[in-house]
Amino acid sequence: MKTDIEIAQAAELTPIAEVAGQLGIEQEELEVYGRYKAKLSEEYIEKIKKNPEGRLILVTAINPTPAGEGKTTITVGLGQAFARLGKKAVIALREPSLGPCFGIKGGAAGGGYSQVVPMEDLNLHFTGDFHAITAANNLLAALLDNHIQQGNLLRIDPRQIVWKRCLDMNDRALRNIVIGMGGKANGMVREDHFIITVASEIMAILCLASDFKDLKERLSRIIVAYDYSGEPVTAKDLQAVGAMAALLKDAMKPNLIQTLEHTPALVHGGPFANIAHGCNSVMATKTALKMADYVITEAGFGADLGAEKFFDIKCRMADLKPDAVVLVATVRALKYNGGVAKEDLARKDMKALQAGIVNLEKHISNIHKYGVPIVVALNAFASDTQEEIDYVQKFCEDRDCEFSLAEVWEKGGEGGTILAGKVLDTLEHKRSFFEPLYGDEISLTEKIHTVASEIYGAGGVTYTAAAKRQLEKLERAGFGRLPVCIAKTQYSLSDDPKLLGRPVGFEMHVREVYVSAGAGFVVALTGDVMTMPGLPKTPAAYRIDVDDDGKIVGLF
């Protein structure tokens, strides 16, 4: 059986100008990166703003497991299936981070015969968007330390610096470092930190900015530190905004590539679903809605993280109204939630399936709270039995959502036509009454409690003394109307990755709270969430190589 990268490399790609032509885009409206990648020009984006908007379909999933769910694969396969049915569809995805490609997760191009290509480019440097974000982030850090070195007119308190450097690579040794050593000429000695680029506030800003003017306004609001009086110091105060914007000018433009079946895909932005809104950029989504009749987009990790943030942060800020949700599950993942070990998941086990399906049940219930109709897509595996599939189908239909088996990994768009038909039928016969879970007017503490209790199933929320002080400070500073972004593990509905299935009544623990003033949300860190991951004992990097013909191997 071919690997994902072998399937992708064997495909015959269509020149990107021809892919764009499917949507009526002229070659001069593209900024081309080689033969198979392009950015949409500012002129084209402006030209289509008066077009009617298409229907917005969100793909999300149950909590991720080692068994795999295939959310991106379903997203790509569904887009291909829409095209096979003669529908004008565009896929809108996030860009993958370099870090996981060399770590444990692999890439994020989909899988099998439902991939976006060129797969190697996408998973490595692509069009340089993430490098631009890294540079802008670190320019701000450099200007901050230089300001202190050059006299510190803003009276920045080195003990209250909150801006961190970033790198798009898993490197645990950089989590906590000391800078400025070696004498006065090398700056002030202080503790510093690195985060992975996708966790940078600039990534979230790029993804949430509606246009270039909005980008600059958001950059100006970034809080980098506090002065000796406890007042915030911003990127604007450091005169950093113009130079940062210059670095991000091209990165703001959505990237156009194709699927294995030449369906157009906008791939742009990529923040952690743990630490930011976990979706592709507002620019890409809103542009896609003007380009096509149907837009299939994706939110990161399980629905408790990705979908919640898509609804409560992205849709709120961008005034998006999703028309339907496709909720991805697998029989294997449900049995894992029911207590079956990874190596035994291929065996039929109805008892475990019945125990683990409560995870799916909770996600269905959560999405219904937003008023959006649901189609459950069961990603098919060869080991699935008909009895197991029938059980999941009846379970879903009893809870007022459509159900479809999806075979897009093996069959591409052809394996998703039944699913696409179910989605189209849902769009035609079920109306979306989308509303965010909470309003702007309630306090930050109430917002955190609402998400924790309503979405996660927590019985209550406990705060460290530091988190309580931070919440009080943010309310006093006027940030109380912002939405909350709760950073927690993706592996459980709770903040404990070991609690599988559907935990209820647990205490959720908030250890730190801070504001991403430029992005426009307040982050609550729970459990042991890391903003700079490490590499595993056997990193994926060990398997990646380039052969004598210049072909990349081992990437997945």
Image (cartoon, rainbow, N blue to C red):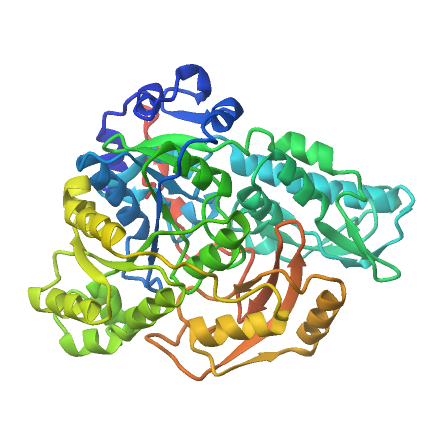
Query: Which percent across, then down, holds residue 480?
Result: 67, 65
The residue most toward the left is 386
Closer to the camera, 109 or 515?
Answer: 515
Query: Which percent across, then down, holds residue 313?
Result: 52, 56
Residue at the spot 63% in from the left edge and 31% down from the top edge: 247
Q: Is residue 322 visible in the rendered structure shown here?
A: yes
Q: Quadrant of the C terminus?
A: top left
Residue at the spot 52% in from the left edge and 54% down from the top edge: 316
Which quarter of the figure has residue 25?
A: top left
User: Does residue 307 lie above or below 551 as drawn?
Assistant: below
The residue most toward the top is 28
User: Does residue 371 lie above or below 340 as drawn?
Assistant: above
Query: Which percent across, then down, holds residue 330?
Result: 23, 61
User: Does residue 305 lie above or below 408 as drawn?
Assistant: below
Which quarter of the figure has residue 267?
A: top left
Closer to the camera, 406 or 48?
Answer: 48
Closer to the camera, 485 or 105?
Answer: 485
Residue at the spot 44% in from the left edge and 15% down from the top edge: 28
Horizontal relation, residue 88 to residue 391: left or right: right
Residue at the spot 19% in from the left edge and 50% down from the top edge: 419
Q: How many marks?
A: 0
Q: Is residue 1 visible in the rendered structure shown here?
A: no
Closer to the camera, 337 or 195?
Answer: 337
Q: Quadrant of the N terminus?
A: top left
Query: Which percent across, then down, holds residue 65?
Result: 32, 63
